[in-house]
Image (spheres, rainbow, N blue to C red):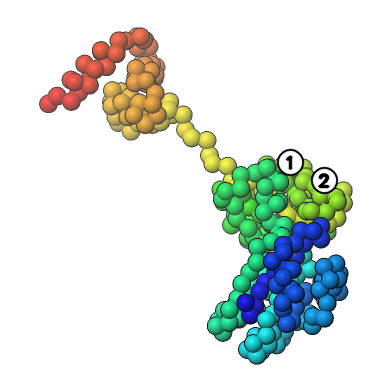
């Protein structure tokens, strides 16, 4: 394949596939986020004699043009980042998009990424989840993003820089309240750790100082507690329905015995009228008769 994005280990150098190694060996050129970092991996697996071209945040546009020219010459280009899958939060996507638009063949290999291990290690529901990458640097944009996600019911995932972990989790705690979360750091490394708790607790822990690459996973907005059948029944009564009709509707909606609903509504009606509570323990046949009468014109 002319262009291939190749995932590389995010910690343990053994976390690389045989296919990824073969692709790197067969490449004519390897584009690296940092050539020094990638050289360590290539040396570990005896991949030598390959031209390395830097492709990072500050030269991505210029190097993309150069690499597209190499693809036009028929060269096979492999792209790696310092760790993980290129194009997610590291350079690579601009080149991939350019290659696809130009009609060049392109592929992305499966492999290491911090995203999925963090989601699973969080212990929060993995389906569905929303990946947001790194939050915006500008405070106004960041707060706008966080505010827009306040009611999102999905598990939400952010990449977090270690020196910003405390501030970001504190900001989310302020806007989102007491949500469960996990800050997962140093994935596949010796000091891998998943710090679980409420956002406020994680912010306090992060304030004590943490190192390493981090992924913050936060539970989605909890669904509001459904109204009880008693509340629904009273609303139907207030809306003008008869006791029998309201009782039948609640029984059908909620699977509650109709007699229990009717007893409740009759008690409410009696209390509002200042009269005695309705008698309880009516027979089921009474309900059947009521229904027959109600349905007769």
Q: At x 70% / y 52%, what residue is drawn? A: 117
User: Can residue 263 be seen at all in this image of the molecule?
Assistant: yes
Residue closer to the observer: 59 or 266: 59
As drawn, 167 above or below 109:
above
Q: Which residue lies furthest to the left in this view?
A: 297
The answer to which of 247 and 17 lies nearer the viewer is 17
Find disc 1 in the rendering and name its residue: 197
Q: Where is residue 8 in the image (x, y as percent from the top left)?
A: 75, 65
Residue 174, position in %: x, y? Answer: 70, 49
Q: Residue at x 69, y 66 (%)?
A: 19
Query: Is residue 11 among the parts visible in the rendering?
Result: no
Categorize mark 2 by other alpha carbons within 10 Å: few (<14), some (14-19), many (20+).
some
For the point 85% across and 50% down, which residue is it? 191
Q: Which mark is residue 32?
A: none
Residue 138 vertical position relative to residue 127 in the rendered view, above or below: below
For the residues bearing labels 2 and 1, Cβ distance under 8 angstroms: yes
* Circle 2: element type: helix
Counting residues from the N terminus, which is met first, the one under dot 2 or under dot 1?
Answer: 1
Q: How crowded is mark 1: few (under 14 residues within 10 Å), some or many (20 or more)?
A: some
Q: Is residue 262 left or right of residue 122?
A: left
Q: How far apart are marks 2 and 1 (CA)?
A: 10 Å
Q: Which of 221 and 100 is in front in this view?
A: 100
Residue 138 lies, with reference to residue 49, above or below; the image says above
Query: In which quarter of the view is residue 115 placed?
Result: bottom right
Quadrant of the image occupied by residue 215: bottom right
Q: Where is residue 226 in the image (x, y as percent from the top left)?
A: 48, 35
Disc 1 element: strand
According to the picture, the residue beneath numbered tag 2 turns out to be: 205
Question: Looking at the image, how many numbered discs can be counted on the residues?
Answer: 2
At 67% across and 50% down in the image, what residue appears? 119
């Amino acid at each position: 394949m002319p262009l291939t994005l190749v995932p590389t280990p995010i910690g343990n150098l053994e976390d690389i596939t045989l296919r990824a190694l073969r692709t790197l060996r067969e490449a004519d050129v390897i584009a690296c986020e940092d050539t020094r970092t990638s050289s360590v991996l290539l040396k570990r697996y005896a991949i030598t004699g390959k031209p390395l071209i830097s492709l990072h945040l500050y030269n991505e546009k210029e190097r993309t043009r150069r690499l597209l020219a190499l693809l036009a010459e028929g060269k096979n280009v492999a792209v790696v980042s310092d760790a993980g899958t290129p194009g997610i939060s590291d350079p690579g996507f601009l080149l991939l998009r350019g290659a696809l638009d130009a009609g060049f063949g392109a592929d992305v290999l499966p492999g290491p990424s911090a995203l999925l291990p963090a989601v699973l290690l969080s212990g929060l529901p993995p389906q569905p989840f929303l990946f947001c990458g790194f939050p915006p640097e500008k405070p106004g944009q960041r707060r706008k993003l966080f505010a827009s996600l306040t009611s999102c019911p999905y598990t939400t995932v952010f990449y977090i820089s270690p020196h910003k972990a405390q501030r970001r989790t504190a900001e989310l705690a302020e806007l989102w309240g007491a949500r469960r979360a996990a800050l997962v750091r140093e994935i596949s490394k010796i000091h891998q750790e998943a710090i679980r708790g409420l956002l406020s607790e994680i912010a306090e822990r992060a304030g004590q100082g943490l190192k390493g690459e981090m992924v913050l996973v936060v539970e989605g907005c909890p669904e509001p507690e459904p109204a009880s059948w008693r509340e629904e029944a009273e609303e139907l009564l207030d809306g003008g329905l008869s006791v029998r009709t309201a009782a039948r509707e609640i029984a059908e909606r909620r699977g509650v015995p109709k007699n229990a609903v009717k007893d409740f509504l009759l008690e409410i009606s009696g209390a509002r009228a200042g009269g005695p509570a309705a008698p309880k323990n009516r027979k089921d046949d009474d309900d059947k008769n009521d229904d027959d009468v109600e349905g007769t014109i």
